[in-house]
Amino acid sequence: MVTVTQPGQRRTPKAAKTNSVAKKAVVAVTGIIMVLYLIAHMIGNLKVFAGRESFNGYSEWIRTIGEPVVPAQTTLTIIRIALLTVVIAHGWAVVSLWRQAKRARPQGYVTKKAVAQSYASRTMRWGGVIVGLFIVYHILDLTMGVVNPEGPSTTPYDRLIAGFSNPFITAVYVVALVLLGMHLRHGIWSATQTLGQSNKRREKTVNLFALVFSVVLIGGYLVVPFSVLFGLVG
Amino acid sequence: MTATQEHPTFASGTAGDDPAMAKHGMTLTLRVWRQKGPQHKGKMVTYQVEDISPDMSFLEMLDVLNEKLILAGDDPVVFDHDCREGICGSCGLMINGIAHGPEQTTTCQLHMRKFKDGDTIDIEPWRATAFPVIKDLSVNRQALDRIIQAGGYISAPTGTAPEAHSILVSKKDSDAAFDAATCIGCGACVAACPNASSMLFTSAKVTHLNLLPQGQPERDDRVVNMIAQQDREGFGGCTNIGECSAACPKGISMETISRLNHDLLGALRAGARPKS
């Protein structure tokens, strides 16, 4: 390898306090935990097709798991704290890497063409921010009910029907879920790479799995709002 | 930008005397990054080159431009080049937004037949904090050398060369190590990466040595120290987008990045920590 010897403009490199690959591993592991939660959440949602009692009963069950051995909502609270920790860790590592990438190229190209990147990989950062904001809205809407058309003092089933009967609210959910699907499509591939589990032979399979998984998962989510919107449920 | 001239006029001279050359001579508009020095602000400057043969390499086309500039009393465009046969890795240029241009090879092996008469070509240096511009299109890539110094070596005893067959290497490992070892350190991976990460370079070096028996004693320290140096140099982190591998003149696979990650996480678990 030959490089020019003139020093050019160099600042003294500062000691690396953190490790970018370790941070990536945090993103990957927290991402996988969230994906596991998303699978459970999607399957739970499908209870809506079993009717009002079944759906509300499911919601009630989550809040009473372990009773009377443990007080009400113990399991739910543990899940919530775990998820919040995971989301914060995911966000912290990503923001830190985002800033590192910004510092790594302060002056961009006049002309830059993408050769290999997918739309999903290009939208990971802002797509992730939008999905994060959507999750806040989603909790205010269907979990707490404060921004739901039916208000907070209703059953989960009523809030769901009221929300998705409105085409605008459904549209918000559809856009956010499609973004989430793309986030997962690149995220699953990227996590496999980051955790060192990919190779030339597996590359195609991993990418195909990421695509199929994301489509099936997001399809499972989307079937609920569309069924409400088109009057199949409720 | 569109073609600037529909009917190119051919300059008289050697090429003009040869009807075959004249028939194929191209007129091109070049927009070249000019920057006086590391501390100066640069800008794109437009030049016209005429009578470019499709058989010329991209660097020969730049030589034509420089001869023209020198004859006109202007400062020639500084660009790095050395072997001009695709193995030294010096001649990195961002050509129309693609590292090393439209063909997956080095700039010196890119031929002008890849361009059409009347084309406008943007030529920029690699852009990364870790690759400061020295002048015009020439950047300082010593950051890559320092990553090598952090662990891209093996400790071998001195003395007579050992019998080559005394240490056996499986065909599979030997092939994979050789594929990684084809890296010429040109920096196209950094230039193409949206995060300006040198991950493909570092992972190629780590893969090359960590796959071989000779690389085992320093295996954990190597990966930990090389990544620490990469971060220290101000490169970005990898997001597995794949622009690096698509731009690599040696076609080094993303598999090497997965291998580096695997080795790094294993080394951290085993307690290896970077030298400060």
Image (cartoon, rainbow, N blue to C red):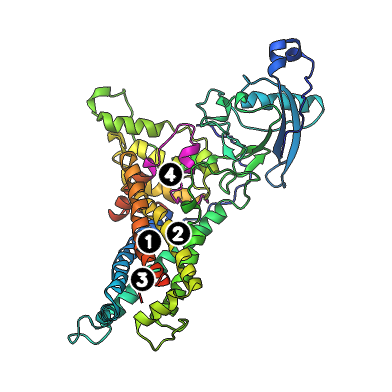
Q: Is residue A43 magenta?
A: no
Q: Amino acid at mark 4?
A: Ala
> Going by the picture, which residue comes out furthest to the front?
A231
Gap between marks 2 and 1, in whole Å? Answer: 38 Å
Q: Amino acid at mark 2?
A: Lys
**Residue A17 image label:** 2
Q: Amino acid at mark 1?
A: Ile
Question: Which residue, given by chain and number where applicable, does mark 3 sit on?
Answer: A232
Res. B144 in view: yes
Check if mark 4 and mark 2 are on a common chain: no
- Disc 2 is attached to a residue of which chain? A
Question: Which residue, given by chain and number where applicable, does mark 1 sit on?
Answer: A218
Looking at the image, is B113 positioned above or below residue A22?
above
The chief SS type of the magenta part is loop
Q: Amino acid at mark 3?
A: Leu
In the rendered structure, the answer to whether residue A72 lies left or right of residue A107 reads left
Check if mark 3 and mark 2 are on a common chain: yes
Which is more N-terminal, label 1 or label 2? 2
- Disc 1 is attached to a residue of which chain? A
> Going by the picture, which residue comes out furthest to the bottom?
A153
Which is more N-terminal, label 3 or label 1? 1
Gap between marks 4 and 1, in whole Å? Answer: 45 Å
- Disc 3 is attached to a residue of which chain? A
Instruction: State the SS at label 3.
Output: loop
Gap between marks 3 and 2, in whole Å? Answer: 56 Å
Span shown in magenta: B234-257
Q: Nearer the viewer, mark 4 or mark 1?
A: 1
Q: Nearer the viewer, mark 2 or mark 1?
A: 1
- Image coords of residue B8 (percent x, y): 77, 24
